[in-house]
């Protein structure tokens, strides 16, 4: 077996992948490594055992105002449903500690000095091991981020040039899609159905693209494949394979933003969980849908993960899994911008996934229990919806396979003030109905008269351009913004009150 050829950045130079360097933006190509951070690399490689460094501006660890940090977490081994036990204060707790001067997975004295961009080695190592176990990608390198938003905005800048067009779902998360607009990147929304983005529509856009009229063909696809925000759709394995094949044919980069990946529902459960940790992890992994990353043989997938939805949003800690080139370019960017994530989060994750914490098996037990909790909330919302809202005849709802959201379709064509005009030529993207106006009115009336808030689908709609839509039979997106996004992340009391108010509001609105 060939020996690894590990360089100073922890990269195995045996990796041979497709050359994707042409996707890099001019900014990414021109950005140089931070020379001060390079000094840290030189120091770390020095063979002198008693090296005295007077080079960096780190306060000495004896001046850190803490010598022990304690985390009280659920004991995932002592309960079959640790999430419920923890929430009800009926479960046992486990204490995880980080020390300055005692042995632990990541000590305080090692965590708090200035560090290099990809993150502390101990934290990267445990997340690399986790990524290998769960996603099994052919090639991967982990870069830590300040959560998904930080990671995705950096990735957009890695590839985006002024005048570029990126591809995404026709309804997508605006906090992310707004990000590259300021530096000249525009979006092309690809048609969706209840199963998410439609592969044939993706390829149609690429086939029909006119570079003379619209500039260079899109080369980046941004996608939320599991529990898509806002629609709640999840891409099937078949669609994922088709989309990856299209990416290979048309040389696309896939940005796989997957914050809801571990919140997958309706998974058949075995009667008893295996006692053997490796078997438990294997069984848990087998219940999860394959990722684009696991299919990636070219290095064209960048996967974005976060702890926000499974631990806490305020942790602001996540990671990007990418090929060698993109990993190094992201590190260069981070070294001259945000710097690595905070030491507190890195210490906690390292200790949590290490021998004295939950370990990977325990984290998987937490995730499995969390899925059950969210599925119960989803099912409760659907039950109340059928009773309070569906009975009105004015709205329907999807049953999401994952995530935190339901996509409520409002039947505006039943409203007495609904207007629909026949298409008589002109731009195929101009609205032919007053759906958007009625949606805005419904949103405001639900909030102001019923005291309940949902996000209208117009918030998520990617503006259409007649250059890349079919004119024959095309229904403008503005006429398809007939949805409200609702979360089932709240308590049963909040969910029930929300659905009751929605039902009452719809009755009053449609009788107007």
Image (spheres, rainbow, N blue to C red):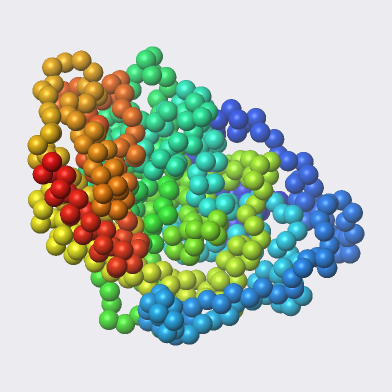
User: Does residue 397 appear in this view?
Assistant: no
- Residue 106 lies, in percent from the top left, at 67, 68
Residue 5 position (above or below residue 187): below
- Residue 148 lies, in percent from the top left, at 49, 50
Kindly indicate the quadrant of the structure image that contains residue 400. bottom left
- Residue 160 lies, in percent from the top left, at 51, 31
Q: Which residue is rendered at x = 10% and y = 53% of the image?
A: 392
Left or right: 459 as drawn, with respect to 304:
left
User: Does residue 168 appear in this view?
Assistant: yes
Residue 139 position (above or below residue 351): above
Q: Which residue is rendered at x = 88% and y = 60% of the image?
A: 51
Left or right: 332 as drawn, with respect to 295:
right
Foreground residue among 298 and 164? 164
Q: Which residue is rendered at x = 21% and y = 59% of the image?
A: 500
Kindly indicate the quadrant of the structure image that contains residue 316. bottom right
- Residue 154 lies, in percent from the top left, at 55, 41
Q: Which residue is rendered at x = 53% and y = 52% of the image?
A: 147
């Amino acid at each position: 077996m060939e020996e690894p050829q590990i360089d100073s950045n922890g990269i195995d130079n045996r990796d041979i992948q497709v050359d994707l360097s042409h996707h890099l933006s001019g900014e990414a190509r021109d950005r140089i490594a931070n020379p001060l951070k390079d000094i840290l690399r030189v120091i770390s490689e020095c063979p002198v055992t008693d090296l005295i460094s007077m080079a960096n501006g780190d306060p000495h660890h004896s001046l850190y105002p803490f010598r022990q940090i304690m985390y009280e977490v659920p004991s995932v081994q002592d309960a079959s449903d640790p999430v419920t036990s923890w929430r009800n204060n009926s479960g046992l707790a486990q204490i995880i500690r980080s020390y300055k001067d005692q042995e632990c997975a990541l000590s305080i004295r090692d965590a708090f000095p200035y560090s290099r961009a990809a993150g502390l080695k101990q934290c990267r190592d445990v997340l690399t091991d986790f990524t290998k176990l769960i996603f099994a990608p052919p090639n991967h390198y982990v870069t830590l981020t300040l959560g998904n938003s930080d990671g995705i905005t950096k990735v957009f800048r890695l590839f985006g040039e002024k005048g570029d067009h990126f591809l995404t779902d026709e309804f997508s998360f605006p906090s992310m899609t707004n990000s590259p607009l300021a530096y000249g990147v525009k979006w092309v929304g690809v048609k969706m159905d209840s199963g998410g983005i439609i592969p044939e529509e993706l390829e149609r856009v690429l086939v029909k693209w006119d570079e003379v009229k619209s500039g260079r063909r899109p080369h980046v696809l941004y996608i939320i494949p599991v529990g898509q925000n806002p629609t709640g759709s999840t891409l099937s394995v078949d669609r994922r394979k088709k989309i990856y094949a299209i990416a290979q044919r048309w040389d696309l980069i896939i940005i796989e933003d997957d914050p809801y990946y571990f919140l997958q529902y309706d998974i058949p459960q075995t009667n008893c969980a295996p006692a053997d940790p490796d078997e438990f992890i294997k069984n848990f992994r087998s219940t999860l849908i394959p990722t684009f990353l696991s299919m990636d043989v070219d290095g064209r997938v960048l996967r974005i993960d976060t702890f926000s939805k499974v631990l806490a949003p305020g942790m602001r800690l996540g990671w990007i899994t990418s090929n060698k080139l993109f990993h190094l370019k992201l590190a260069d960017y981070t070294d001259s911008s945000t710097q690595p994530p905070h030491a507190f989060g890195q210490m906690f994750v390292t200790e949590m996934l290490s021998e004295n914490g939950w370990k990977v098996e325990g984290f998987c037990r937490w995730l499995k229990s969390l899925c059950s909790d969210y599925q119960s909330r989803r099912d409760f919302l659907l039950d109340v919806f059928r009773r309070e809202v569906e009975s009105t005849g004015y709205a329907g709802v999807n049953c999401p396979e994952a995530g935190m959201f339901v996509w409520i379709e409002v039947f505006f064509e039943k409203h007495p003030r609904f207007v629909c005009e026949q298409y008589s030529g002109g731009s195929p993207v101009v609205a032919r109905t007053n759906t958007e106006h009625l949606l805005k009115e419904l949103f405001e009336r639900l909030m102001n008269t019923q005291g309940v808030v949902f996000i209208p689908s117009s918030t998520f709609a990617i503006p259409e351009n007649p250059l890349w839509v079919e004119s024959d039979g095309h229904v403008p997106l503005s006429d398809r913004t007939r949805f409200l996004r609702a979360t089932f992340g709240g308590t049963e009391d909040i969910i029930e009150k929300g659905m009751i108010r929605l039902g009452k509001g719809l009755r009053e609105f449609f009788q107007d």
